C-alpha cells in the first residue's frame, strides 16, 4: 500500500514563508538512527523542463516549529511533465531530492553551535556537501519530538510560483 502526500501551492511568493503541513505527535526518534524520505517536485509554471533548486523542501522537527527545532532544507530538482517508463523512476524521484539523514548529524550540529557559543535565540545553519542545509534553533530534543513540519518554499527567480511536491515514505 504505497501512498505519498501531495502538497500543491498556487501563487507561492518568493521570499515569503514556506507553505506545508504538519503532524503533531510525541515520539522519541533517537531509536531510528536515521531518517529517509523521497521528494518529487513539479514547477507548474514550467512543466517543459527539469530545473534545479527552484523549489526548496523544508522539514522541521522538534518540540515546536518556532523556538526549539531542527530544520533540513533540500533544494529540489523538478521533473518535467511526460509519461515515464518504469526504468526512468530515477527521473521522477531524483536521487538529489532524497533525504538520507543520520540523526547523529543533528546532534553534532547542535554541539558545533554550542562550541561556537552562538545564542539559542538565533538559528544556526550549516550547508552540507550535498547542498542540503541543516539548522538548529533553541534547544530541541530528539527524544521528545512533538511535531514534524513539511513545507515547500519558492526559491526560483519568479515572484509567484505554482508547484506540486510529493513527499513519500518518511522512514
Image (cartoon, rainbow, N blue to C red):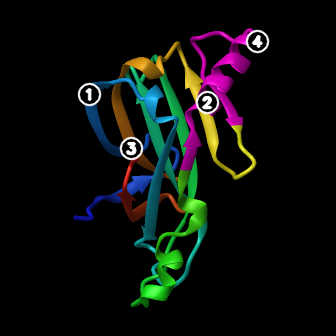
Label 2 sits on a secondary structure element that is: helix
Does the segment drawn in magenta span residue 112? yes
**How many other residues sit within 10 Å of disc 2, few (<14), some (14-19) or many (≥20)?**
few
Label 4 sits on a secondary structure element that is: helix
Residue ID for mark 2: 104
Q: Are marks 2 and 3 in contact (CB under 8 Å)?
A: no
Residue ID for mark 4: 115
Question: Does residue 52 appear left or right of residue 81 in this picture?
Answer: right
Which is more N-terminal, label 3 or label 4?
4
Which is more N-terminal, label 2 or label 4?
2
Q: CA distance from mark 4 to mark 2?
A: 16 Å
Q: Which residues are magenta?
A: 100-126
Q: Which mark, residue 150?
A: 3
In the rendered image, residue 67, in percent from the top left (x then y), is placed at: 45, 17
In the rendered image, residue 68, in percent from the top left (x then y), is placed at: 46, 18
Does the segment drawn in magenta span residue 171? no
Which is more N-terminal, label 3 or label 2?
2
Q: Nearer the viewer, mark 4 or mark 2?
A: 2
Residue ID for mark 1: 25
> Which residue is at a point 45% across and 66% down the rendered structure image?
41
Q: Quadrant of residue 166?
A: bottom left
Q: CA distance from mark 2 to mark 1?
A: 21 Å
Label 1 sits on a secondary structure element that is: strand
Answer yes or no: is residue 49 visible. Answer: yes
Question: Does residue 22 appear left or right of residue 68 in this picture?
Answer: left
Q: Is residue 88 above or below residue 19?
A: below
Amino acid at each position: 500500500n504505497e501512498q505519498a502526500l501531495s502538497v500543491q501551492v498556487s501563487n507561492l511568493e518568493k521570499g515569503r514563508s514556506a507553505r506545508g503541513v504538519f503532524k503533531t505527535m510525541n515520539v522519541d526518534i533517537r531509536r531510528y538512527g536515521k531518517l529517509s524520505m523521497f521528494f518529487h517536485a513539479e514547477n507548474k509554471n514550467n512543466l517543459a523542463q527539469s530545473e534545479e533548486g527552484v523549489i526548496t523542501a523544508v522539514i522541521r522537527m522538534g518540540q515546536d516549529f518556532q523556538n526549539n527545532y531542527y530544520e533540513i532544507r533540500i533544494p529540489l530538482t523538478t521533473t518535467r511533465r511526460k509519461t515515464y517508463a518504469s526504468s526512468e523512476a530515477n527521473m521522477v524521484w531524483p536521487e538529489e531530492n532524497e533525504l538520507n539523514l543520520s540523526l547523529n548529524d543533528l546532534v553534532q550540529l547542535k554541539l558545533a553551535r554550542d562550541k561556537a557559543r552562538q545564542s539559542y535565540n538565533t538559528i544556526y545553519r550549516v550547508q552540507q556537501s550535498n547542498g542540503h542545509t541543516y539548522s538548529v534553533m533553541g534547544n530541541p530534543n530528539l527524544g521528545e519530538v512533538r511535531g514534524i513540519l513539511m513545507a515547500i518554499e519558492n526559491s526560483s527567480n519568479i515572484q509567484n510560483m505554482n508547484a506540486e511536491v510529493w513527499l513519500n515514505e518518511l522512514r
